[in-house]
Image (spheres, rainbow, N blue to C red):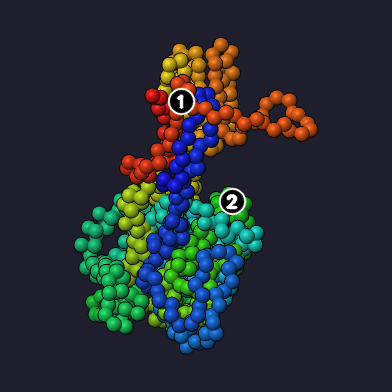
Amino acid sequence: MSGAHARGRTRGKGGGAKAGGAGPAKTANTSAATAAGAASGTGAGAGPAKTGGARGAAPGTGAGAGAGPAKTGGARLDLANEITASLVVFLVALPLCIGVAVASGVPAELGIISGVIGGLVVGAVRGSTLQVSGPAAGLAALVAETVLEHGLAMLGVIVLFSGILQIVLGVVRLGRMFQAISLAVVQGMLAGIGLPLMFSQAYPMSDAKAPGTPIENMAGIPGLFADVLTDPQAMIATLLGIATIVLSFLWKKAPGPAKRIPAALVAVGIGIVVAALPGVDVKTLQVGNLLASVRVPGAGEFAGLADAAVITSILTFTVIASAESLFTAAAVDRIHSGPRTRYNTELIAQGAGNTIAGILGALPITAVVARSSANVQAGAKTRISRTLHGLWLLAFALLLPQVLALIPISVLAGVLVHSGWKLFAPEEFPKMWRQDRGEFVVMTTTTLVIVATALLEGVLIGLAAGIVLAALRMSRTVIRQHVEEDTAKVVMAGNATFLRLPQVIEALESAAASGRPRIRLDLTGVTHLDHACRSQVEEFTAQQRGLGLRVELLMPGPAKAEGPVTTGPVPRPEPMPASAPGPDAEWFYLDAGPLPGGHMDPADIHAESYRPVTSR
């Protein structure tokens, strides 16, 4: 609080005064979108990209819904640049589409189909200009669990109705609702997705099969390590996976133009060469016909909607896919100066993509930071690049499917282990501890519950923990008590809600037990007094007055005049003669100097301002 906001004042005994103006409150600078951008990047450079090319492009004014495209000042469309950017995005997307499908326990072709839909359908809609969508590693564990529980045939129905719900949410303009989520919950959710993903992919990275649940996967790592040491082929597969992980971390430091090639693509190329060597027998991708892999849901699958577990899965997919897409949109908006994302339109576009993906029985679609950042860094300016990348995916799958069969599974698993590490983002935990330990508890709780139970349960518990933390902090009440001569004084400041009722009752009972004939309750510094606390204070006042004690109650808010209301001209009051304070006057002051130790809560400042000073 600065001295410009501090004002001294005097007040006679028993008089009321309003608190001095409170200094401006600090606002949080971080957003959930920052967490999505920092934690869910899966390669392709996470840093801000230069977006030169379109001269006169006006910087966006934020990720506001409905923000119009930035003016380009007459910049010409560079079609060659858009095609080049689309090829870069295609090279990033191809191994990720396949890897996510394998990690999800479904045929690789379904991952490519979802990637094609993310480009040709979602990419064509004017929601977010540079954001690229497709199957995401963040949903791999959820899809694998759903397929294991309900079967691959039901996946299409679940994705279909999730897409319809997304369209409804966008039409009723609830796109921004997903931004009203605690940053700690978002980071905890991403970490809870990334940690199990890393452990589950450690098994296919060694050409082995994962035991099942995240806890079982973690517990089985020592046995997996022992098996790898005794099997030469498993050792080769593991070394390929480890090389892929190391390459994913270090490739961005490669000299010259080589670093523009996606690290995952380089790893796939190395894996194909090693797998072709004599004496090497590692598992490679099994690829079938793209069109034959389409699974349109039938009447039997739609009948499964009567199962409550299926409805729960639909809601889970809707919430997680929508949140991840919109968080990613805000993160991508931070690294380019082009048109801002239209959140409701983007949610409708994501819904349209998932609706078509569900009809074809493919994987769910979300926005993906890795592809989006690669698109921005490649110099894309319009939706053409992200739309064309879907066309290249389709052409490759139809014309060159035999190339996919050469890719070692351990390399794709290594790509996803790197993705899981980026989602987990372990550096965010100590950072959150230093910034806010209460939010750290929310973040850690969300992660642990997701790992121990499931994604939806973890997110719901994390949201509940965040709401409780916010409620406790917003209901902060500062109470000061002291006794002077024949008066027991209680001064309250802050927000008095039912959460602080025990503290309020304890202060009132302490004042009553002091044995003084007079009690003074000063609540003028209370900014919010809910019904529970107000009733308690009023009941206490009436009870003590009934016992013959004199209770002075100063309530928050403007004073209300009591007595009969007069009509006609109001008599002009005569001026009061100026006089000095008497010997029994009480002085109250607010220290305008710098506070020791820096920041102090406004509620503490108000309570401290009412410290009595002995008159001399």
Q: Nearer the viewer, residue 26 or 122?
A: 26
Q: Which residue is drawn at 58% across and 49% down?
A: 308
Q: Is residue 374 above or below residue 460?
A: below
Q: Is residue 103 left or right of residue 73?
A: left
Q: How crowded is mark 2: few (under 14 residues within 10 Å), some or many (20 or more)?
A: few
Q: Position of residue 66 (x, y in %)?
A: 60, 66
Quarter of the image where one finds residue 164: bottom right
Q: Residues within 10 Å of mark 1 (few under 14, many from 20)?
A: some
Q: Nearer the viewer, residue 323 or 38?
A: 38
Which residue is tagged 2? Answer: 307
Q: In this view, does 408 lie above or below 521?
A: below
At label 2, which amino acid type do we have? Asp
Q: In this view, does 360 lie to the left or right of 107?
A: right
Q: Nearer the viewer, residue 38 or 487?
A: 487
Q: Which residue is drawn at 32% across and 49% down?
A: 434
Which residue is tagged 1? Answer: 586
Q: In this view, does 249 lie above or below 225?
A: below
Rendered image: mark on residue 322: none
Q: Position of residue 125 (x, y in %)?
A: 58, 73
Give me the C-alpha separation between circle 1 and circle 2.
Answer: 71 Å
Between disc 1 and disc 2, the foreground one is 1
Q: Which residue lies furthest to the bottom in this view?
A: 80
At label 1, which amino acid type do we have? Glu
**Would residue 317 be visible to someone looking at this image?**
no
Q: In this view, does 566 lie to the left or right of 456?
A: right
**Would residue 170 be visible to someone looking at this image?**
yes
Q: Residue at x 20, y 62 (%)?
A: 229
Q: Position of residue 385 (x, y in %)?
A: 49, 80
Tell me the SS state at disc 2: loop
Tell me the SS state at disc 1: loop
Q: Which of marks 1 and 2 is nearer the N terminus?
A: 2
